[in-house]
Image: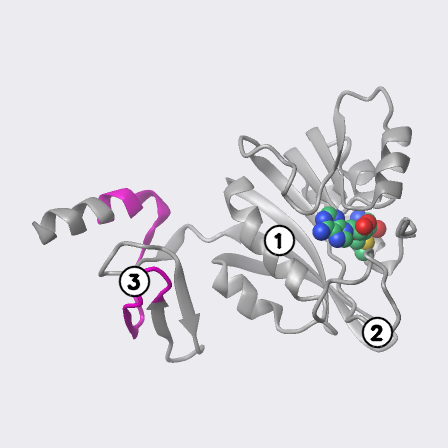
Amino acid sequence: MDEIYEPEEDSKLLEKYVKTLTKGVVLDMGTGSGIQSKAAYDQASKIYAVDINEKAIIHCKNIFKGDKKIEVIKSSLFENLSEELIFDTIIFNAPYLPLDEGDKDIALDGNIGGFKIIELFLEQARPYLAQSGIILLIFSSKSGDIISLFKKYNYEHTLLEKIHIFFEDIFCYKLNLNPFVKICPKCGSTNIMVEGFKYTLDSCNDCGFQIQNFPEIEITEIEEFKKQLKDDNF
Ligand SMILES: C[S@@+](CC[C@H](N)C(=O)[O-])C[C@H]1O[C@@H](n2cnc3c(N)ncnc32)[C@H](O)[C@@H]1O
């Protein structure tokens, strides 16, 4: 069984912002030792502490035993979380180190250069995040280009702090849902792939339509946009 992640500088960096920015219902993804749930405790109304690692789950169930404010759940990302749940704060000190030969520790291995798990997390987190909710995320410079992922999954990001440890930079980001979303002018899908930065070529993952820069609308206007498209096609 994998060991529980011993809090390091990355944990301490995140802990600092969890203490000041946490609000409402909290998801502590990859809870490990439970350090972030403890930091969130006073500001939170309810905490869901999640980990894939059985040892971390046993440990957290033990330390939070009898505490109704904290629920400890074994899950790979959002797999075992009810779809009804909406979080005001999601915390994730993601596994982020690229995997070295022979090194197979799920506390560190983000799979494919630390990137895959963060991409899955950002994709799956969106429907669980309240409109005014925040994600507090730790990311390492060793893992790749995170900004393109924020863009792809339509998050606004603020860099809270960067620290340098040995050969890497550790970043602590605050993410918000971008209230605007790109929409396909042909089929109304918001499942859009954006390529390039300055001159973007947008393509619809559902109908395949491509042009430079699809229109951006407020999330609350999606249904009206789709209805308009239908009416125009009749
Ligand atoms: C870098 S450690 C962070 C632990 C703790 N939150 C902290 O700040 O010290 C990453 C944690 O993510 C967990 N983890 C890895 N893959 C996961 C997955 N697919 N779903 C949930 N947790 C995962 C690991 O078991 C580990 O506890």
- Does 219 lie within the magenta span? yes
Pointer 1 with pointer 3, Cβ within 8 A: no
Query: What is the span of residues highlighted in magenta in the rendered image?
Result: 204-225
Q: Which residue is drawn at 31% across and 58% down?
A: 183
State how far apart marks 1 and 3 are (Cα). 25 Å
**In what element is the residue under mark 3?**
loop
Question: Mark number for residue 121?
Answer: 1
Pointer 2 with pointer 3, Cβ within 8 A: no
How packed mark 2 is, by other alpha carbons closer than 10 Å (few <14, some 14-19, many 20 or more), is few
Q: Is mark 1 within 8 Å of ligand 1?
A: no
Residue at mark 3:
207
- Residue 176 location in percent, x, y? 54, 51
Residue at mark 2:
100
- Residue 117 location in percent, x, y? 67, 59
- Residue 120 location, quadrant: bottom right
Amino acid type assigned to the residue bearing label 3 in the image: Cys
| Of 1 and 129, the residue lying toward us | 1
Report the mark closest to the observer, 1 or 3. 3
One can see residue 56 in this view:
yes
